[in-house]
Image (cartoon, coloured by chain):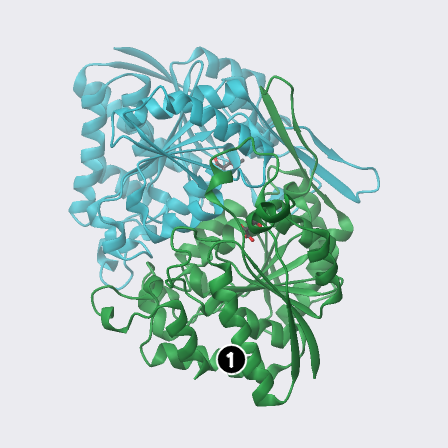
Chain colours: A cyan, B green
């Protein structure tokens, strides 16, 4: 199989972790006889520094022309503390999501038995958890009109959804539920928001096409609570952009660390694969970042973008084996009992490769 | 001290739990020589059934004329599954918050040592947690203009904040931080939302007036994660209406159960005291609901609305003693080891009274 893969390292630890994602792809290509060719492009703070634009045209063109994109991370504290900055790294990420029509963000909560103890939740609460989030990614208050009045006494963001936006991701989520445990939980705030009421209506309608899937509706506040209380009760979780952002980060604690979670953004064209963690500038360049989320993003790419299930499985297994052998990065290690097994980014990457 | 207290039981388990809140108030009055007089009013589903209006004028008038309000719970599954219903119980709650100018919702996460094991979080993660949430309550996407087009293919809700709305709650939160551990964490989504950028600017400005308080800004997704990972790191958490709704429900798992959390809504006039739990129609009328959140709401009323610190303390202590003696309601009991100590609503209420 021949594929063009675009690597966008982005900001902070993005460079370090995508390096390992790329090496895993190279190893897979070699081993299974595929031809993966690579190109690289800039985005985010890195791109702003280079030419003032968080998503240069060249990056977008390369992205559209590629078969899949491996992305690192975005953001920089500089902008976070300056709410009035007009140009921001995140604009690059939001724009590429929109331009590539990446309306469905899949975030599987993959629980490695070895990391049961790394979580702040009790092992008995966690054991057996297997959740797949479908987060809508190109609508909601993220992309609605923003305003601020002249004397800075008022600001607004329009939260909004079109019916077709809800329909297409809902179908994808139901299709996935069919191949899993046949339960779907749609999360909204229909007791307060009109957007959520439209969302709920559409999900109710489409649910009729999937009578074999058990459908539930839950308010976001309750969902945020249930996810901590009893994560096992969820199978597929379907939700809007903003609620999905919040719930999936929260759910990262189920997997022990944000450093373990991969995501796939799909839609009309090229798929986009990225860890859910941020740019973590505080540890960037120190060989401390956990490369496993990037490596697991590669597994998602192989599976979803290329249909290479066997190869994807091999990558996930390599990660599991490495953890089973006791190797840890700082974020997933128990400081007391596992301190002698803590590896840097590069050593961890190398372990998985071997 | 002479006070008029309005009881609004609301829906579902609201009636059962406020009964016990009221009895605690009566006992306090007797014991400390106060004169509390009580009136009752309807709201929510109960009020819709009675006269089609979730917040009857009479209820609002009584509310404005009272010195404090003890509220039960709101909501009914009937409306949740019917997104097109025009009249909804929650409208009553939102309207009374707005009409009474209850812009600050205080939600203390009170951790009873006895309930450390009732949580899904590990005891060592929880121990020592003491968080006070300041949730803005009369602005945000809750109250912005809503729209739906004629053919139901589009819906929207305007998320918005005025500077003065952010200022007044921010000051209250900083004042509280001063009397506590002097740390304030403001939660927003300033990397995406204009509303959040205004929010962050205002908090940054006001923080200068409180140099003795350590101020931090956190994105909502990260906050939802940190709350599970390391709740101890928080002292005062300040946030907008929607984010506060989500975070405080999530945080209820720290206290073991939603059945334990009380809240105080304050602002321009009469204060409003309520459990953060919902109407729980599934257990309503079965003598199963946990009355402790309602009783703890009474403690907040005594403290915040009437300035009766000693009386408030006595109520909290009575709750702590009851838990120490091993008594539990179903929601906070360990099914295996504590089954013989499980009480109904009424028995639990009576234990606290005694
Ligand atoms: C960086 C930010 C804009 C982004 C989001 O909110 O979508 C991130 O948190 C994510 O979840 O991918
Ligand atoms: C019932 C609902 C409208 C309400 C809210 O979202 O504010 C509730 O969840 C709360 O937190 O008090």
Q: Is residue B195 visible?
A: yes
Q: Residue drawn 71% across and 81% down?
A: B2
Residue B303: give x, y in percent of width and height. Answer: 62, 76
Relative placement, left or right, of B214 versus B73 is right
Residue B163: give x, y in percent of width and height. Answer: 76, 49
User: Quick one: which residue is furthest to the right in this view?
Assistant: A151
Could you say which is closer to the camera, residue B149 or residue B137? B149
Q: Residue drawn 52% across and 76% down?
A: B23
Could you say which is closer to the camera, residue A314 or residue B117? B117
Q: Quadrant of residue B140?
A: top right
Which chain's residue wears label 1? B
Residue A262: give x, y in percent of width and height. Answer: 35, 35
Q: Residue drawn 70% across and 67% down?
A: B210
Q: Is residue A327 visible?
A: no
Q: Residue drawn 54% across and 83% down?
A: B27
Could you say which is closer to the camera, residue B187 or residue A215? A215
Question: Quarter of the image containing the N terminus of chain B?
Answer: bottom right
Relative placement, left or right, of B186 versus A5 is right
Could you say which is closer to the camera, residue A231 or residue B234? A231
Question: Quarter of the image containing the C terminus of chain B?
Answer: bottom left
Relative placement, left or right, of B39 versus B278 is right
Residue B68: give x, y in percent of width and height. Answer: 67, 69
**Quick one: SS at disc 1?**
helix
Q: Quadrant of residue A92?
A: top right
The residue that mark 1 highlights is: B315
């Amino acid at each position: 199989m021949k594929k063009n893969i675009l690597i966008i390292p982005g900001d902070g630890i993005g460079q370090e972790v995508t390096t390992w994602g790329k090496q895993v792809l190279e190893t897979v290509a070699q081993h299974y006889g595929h031809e993966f060719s690579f190109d690289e492009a800039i985005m985010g703070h890195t791109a702003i520094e280079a030419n003032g634009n968080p998503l240069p045209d060249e990056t977008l063109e390369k992205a559209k022309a590629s078969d899949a994109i491996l992305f690192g991370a975005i953001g920089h504290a500089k902008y976070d503390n300056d709410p009035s900055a007009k140009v921001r790294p995140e604009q690059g990420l939001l724009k590429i999501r929109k331009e590539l029509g990446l309306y469905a963000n899949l975030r599987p909560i993959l629980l490695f038995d070895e990391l049961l103890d790394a979580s702040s939740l009790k092992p008995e609460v966690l054991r057996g958890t297997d959740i797949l989030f479908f987060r809508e990614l190109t609508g909601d208050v993220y992309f609605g009109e923003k305003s601020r009045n002249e004397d800075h006494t008022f600001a607004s963001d329009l939260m909004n959804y079109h019916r077709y936006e809800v329909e297409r991701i809902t179908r994808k989520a139901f299709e996935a539920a069919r191949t899993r445990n046949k339960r779907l939980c749609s999360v909204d705030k229909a007791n307060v928001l009109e957007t959520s009421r439209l969302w709920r209506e559409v999900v109710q309608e489409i649910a009729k096409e999937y009578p074999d899937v058990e459908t539930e509706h839950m308010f976001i506040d309750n969902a945020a609570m249930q996810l901590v209380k009893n994560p096992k009760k969820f199978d597929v979780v379907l939700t809007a952009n903003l609620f999905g952002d919040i719930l999936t980060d929260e759910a990262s604690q189920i997997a022990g660390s944000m450093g373990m979670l991969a995501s796939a953004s799909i839609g009309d064209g090229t798929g986009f694969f990225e860890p859910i963690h941020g740019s973590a500038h505080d540890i960037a360049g120190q060989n401390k970042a956990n490369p496993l989320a990037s490596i697991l993003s590669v597994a998602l790419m192989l599976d979803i973008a290329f249909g290479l299930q066997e190869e994807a499985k091999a990558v996930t297994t390599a990660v599991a084996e490495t953890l089973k052998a006791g190797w840890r990065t700082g974020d997933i290690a128990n400081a007391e009992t596992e301190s002698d097994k803590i590896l840097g980014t590069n050593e961890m990457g190398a372990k998985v490769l071997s």
